[in-house]
Image: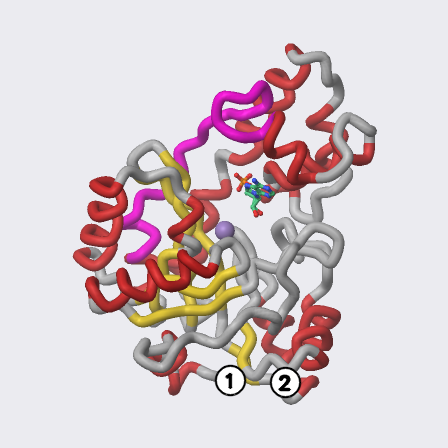
Amino acid sequence: MVSDGTLTPEVLAERAQTNGVELWALTDHDEIGGQHRAAAAARAQGLKYLTGTEISVTFANETVHIVGLGFDPDNAGLLQGLRNTRGGREQRAMEMSDSLAKAGITGAFEGALKFVGNPELISRTHFARFLVESGVCRETSEVFRKYLTEGKPGYVPHRWATLQNAVTWITQAHGIAVIAHPGRYNFTPNEEYALFTEFRAHGGRGVEVVTGSHTRQEYVKYAETAREFGLAASRGSDFHSPDESHTDLGALPFLTGELTPVWELLADRIQ
Ligand code: AMP
Ligand code: MN
């Protein structure tokens, strides 16, 4: 709600409860301003809750997402770090708009802003919604394919936090850091190995194995990676909105038995 999801924490908590979710974490991009409200909404539904966020990191010229779970939502270092990493989004959005204008699509910055709840967090998703609304594309996945990914006219690379920064902010706030949807990055095997090795060295503890962004083969592959690197395993829907997300809350398969779930490391942080 404070980044690029479309539903409020209350509606999400109710949806999670209806779908049989037992433990929920709201993970806005680079922002934790919705955490107290989400925890209260979970409590009202009788749903267990862990604090969450998803921090954008630049690693080997790619954007990698690091999920933080079970941290103190009032931790000053984490709040300041996230504020810094959000700082560059508006500038990048203006550059994306200029770039789209050169491809014949005008007014994209203002158009995207209409979809933004929190102006500090304007993201590619907001541009995608504007391009669908204005009839340039039929759906957001088409916008990403044609405009918002590397090599396409509306794509502007951006330098986010470093891997070390993101892991450290989360860990110092007493949370655990988790590599989000590793199957989505275009890394060579060597780069992926470096990501996992450095992540561990900085104190990272988990990896998303079952997520809406992974195929079944990737569940198996990253379960193996979790074992190889001694990481706990996470499961996340990456649910953004009923219209855009393929995977609903609570719809994914369970983690297989031989993995240690991240929530076992966070038993004392569950609210
Ligand atoms: P940003 O942080 O501005 O780079 O935008 C990231 C957002 O774009 C996240 O919410 C992703 O879920 C979404 N996203 C990234 N790639 C795609 C894609 N290929 N199709 C749909 N959404 C995507
Ligand atoms: Mn993500």
Query: Where is mark 1, residue-wise?
Result: 271
> For this rendering, which residue is in front, 259 or 49?
259
> For this rendering, which residue is in front, 203 or 168?
203
The kind of secondary structure element at disc 2 is helix
Look at the magenta stretch and give its main secondary structure. Answer: loop
Rendered residue at 34%/32% (across/down)? 61
> How many numbered marks, from 0 up?
2
User: Does the magenta segment cover residue 148?
Assistant: yes
User: Does the magenta segment cover residue 119?
Assistant: no
Query: Where is mark 2, residue-wise?
Result: 43
Rendered residue at 17%/57% (across/down)? 201
Is residue 30 in view?
no
The relative height of residue 118 versus residue 247 in the rendered view (above or below) is: above
The relative height of residue 243 versus residue 132 in the rendered view (above or below) is: below
Is residue 38 in view?
yes
Rendered residue at 64%/49% (across/down)? 4
Q: Residue 4 carries which label?
A: none
Counting from the top left corner in percent of width and height, residue 133 is at 81, 35
Q: Indicate left or right for 68 with 120 as reference.
A: left
Which range is magenta? 147-167
Counting from the top left corner in percent of width and height, residue 252 is at 56, 69
Counting from the top left corner in percent of width and height, residue 237 is at 56, 63
